[in-house]
Image: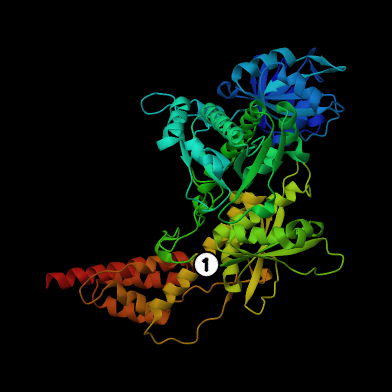
Amino acid sequence: MNKLYIGNLNENVTAEDLVKTFDDNKIPYSGQFLMKTGYAFVDCPDDQWAMKAIEAFSGKVELHGKHIEVEHSVPKKQRTRKLQIRNIPPHLQWEVLDGLLAQYGTVENCEQVNTDSETAVVNVTYGTREHARQAIQKLNGYEFENNSLRVSYIPDETSDVDSQHGPDNSRMPSKHQHADIPLRLLVPTQYVGAIIGKEGATIRNITKQTQSKIDVHRKENAGAAEKPISIHSTPEGCSSACRLILDIMQQEAKDTKTAEEVPLKILAHNNFVGRLIGKEGRNLKKVEQDTDTKITISPLQDLTVYNPERTITVKGPIEACCLAETEIMKKVREAYDNDMAAMNQQTHLIPGLNLGALGLFPPSGSMPPPPSGNSASPYGSFGAPEQETVHVYIPAQAVGAIIGKKGQHIKQLSRFAGASIKIAPAEAPDSKMRMVIVTGPPEAQFKAQGRIYGKLKEENFFGPKEEVKLETHIKVAAAAAGRVIGKGGKTVNELQNLTAAEVVVPREQTPDENDQVIVKIIGHFYASQLAQRKIRDILTQVRQQQKGGMGERQGERQGPHPGPVLSEMGPSQGLAQEPRPQRNCFEKIMKWKNSRGEINVSIFSLQKTRFNYPVAFLFFIRRMFLASNSSSFFCLIYFLIAFSNDIGLYFLCLNALGFSLCELQHNNTQ
């Protein structure tokens, strides 16, 4: 949202006037001002500068007798449900603001924007386009406690998705239809029979009435006091089925006098629960107040690697419990949609990760089954994934939160991620950072590091609007560090541009006892993960090239293996780079033509590799007796040029190939 719309411009306003206005207020911009009649467009470097420009100029700066209006530039197709409200009194309570916004429709989300202004700014998402339209009409310019509210659209990225159509021109399911996640209930075992009914008659009736698919997992957790039920339908269908099941359980409890009140228990994946609870429990408290229920959530200690779900218990009258179920599942589905969108965006960016195998989302219909011996490996025919070690640096005061009471949290995290997680001792008594050592395959690294990032955010070690950025270290072979850096730092710069993470290979490192050096990665979770995977890819390529070089040299007589060479960054870099294979010229040239007359031009895969010139010279002397005088002359010229630059070297290669072709043709005619 860094593109700005500048409106209410006098016809005499020029681009120079706007340039001066921005420069006087020290607001940077990129590119040129696109001038139109009565309005203009300009790009800011990022969202924060765009926000500062809006706050500094909109309604406050006068040009040629008119106060200009500045807001986010939003394409028409993205002016749907999302609004930005500015100039809100800073002391205003959230409850008052919620009440004001709710007058114009259902508010799905309301987030405060971190700004430097004295007044507050919020981004609001309404349930429908019409609600947002009414809100912007009524609230823009609305006088509220001596402040005039400013309301404008902000881009709604989901609008493009919602407007897509299928092959038959029918509307495709939008993200707001929530067809991918079931409602999962936990019911006492003694009521399962009543829910199913005689020969399944009751559950068939529920399925027919609510147009849903209901799975009762009777065989899971044999002997357990409670059984899970999965309901697949629209949100309305799930809620209707839930109501009927609650009625059946309540009637059964009354008939058998086993309980006065049967609570509603909903199963939700742990990844969604934090957003359901909200900051300081605000979201959960609001659901309790709106529905007049009591809601509790099972502790983290109850989670296992095979059951990452938490139990949400709702107590109250049936009508109130049903209202609470609607609100709870609305939050869960929103979290699911957001995570799936983020996952789809990142899947193609993080090579080497099987994101579908992470277990972040509950499978439809059942709990995640334990791995069996005949289950397909996500790694295909390449066997078990390689164990990786990553050092994650966290604030020293956050160590207790990561470890948990009596070490319960770190143990649970280790089991859930399938990784070894250890806290290293402090390097000094006053150390501000502590090192977390995570060892495991790529998927385990993704899960473990993601949970560490999330825990620091949940425990407020970072501000509410502050992005969690951590420093991670991975070790690479000293001989491969130059490949990570690249010539003139090209590779590391490309890494940083691609991943948005800061990647640093410290200069003048001394390799450790394993001949390894450290690569530092600083960034938010996805940026760090992408950088780690890209670096691992580079290391894998280095190992494969080393193995390939060893295979080609088997059976050959070789001298001592050349030592590591300095990175192309120069001697000041102080880091070793993988030695490039110095192949013998005679060996390569003789491979161009074997006894069957076949040509192998693999020599062109070598980059800037100097040949064994004496051997090459003897080879070309031999060729000159088979070629014409003019060809012999050019051969010598190319050979002399090859000593002075690499272009001549390539000419030399081409000329040699030409001689081989001549001889091949000569042999074929005989």
Task: Identify the residue shown where x is 64% and y is 61%.
Answer: 414
Q: Position of residue 361 (x, y in %)?
A: 55, 46
Quadrant hosting residue 492? bottom right
Q: Is residue 423 left or right of residue 586?
A: right
| Farthest front residue in view | 256
- Give 274 or 469, whichever is nearer the viewer: 274
Asked if 368 appears above or below 166 in the picture, the reply is below
Quadrant hosting residue 567? bottom right
Task: Identify the residue shown where x is 42% and y is 32%.
Answer: 201
| Total numbered labels | 1
- The local secondary structure at tag 1 comes to loop
Q: Tell me the quadrant of the picture where the N terminus can be found.
A: top right
- Give 614 or 116, whichever is nearer the viewer: 116
Q: Position of residue 250 (x, y in %)?
A: 60, 32
Q: Is residue 73 left or right of residue 211?
A: right
Q: Position of residue 188 (x, y in %)?
A: 58, 43
Q: Determine if residue 291 is in view.
A: yes
Asked if 139 appears above or below 382 in the picture, the reply is above
- Give 136 or 494, whichever is nearer the viewer: 136
User: What amino acid is labelled 1 in the image?
Assistant: Glu
Asked if 556 appears above or below 599 in the picture, the reply is below
Q: Determine if residue 523 is in view.
A: no
Is the image coloured rainbow, by chain, by secondary structure, or in one colour? rainbow
Q: Position of residue 512 (x, y in %)?
A: 67, 77
Task: Identify the residue shown where x is 72% and y is 12%.
Answer: 138
Q: Tell me the quadrant of the picture where the C terminus can be found.
A: bottom left
- Can you identify the residue that label 1 sits on? 386
Q: Residues within 10 Å of mark 1 (few under 14, many from 20)?
A: few
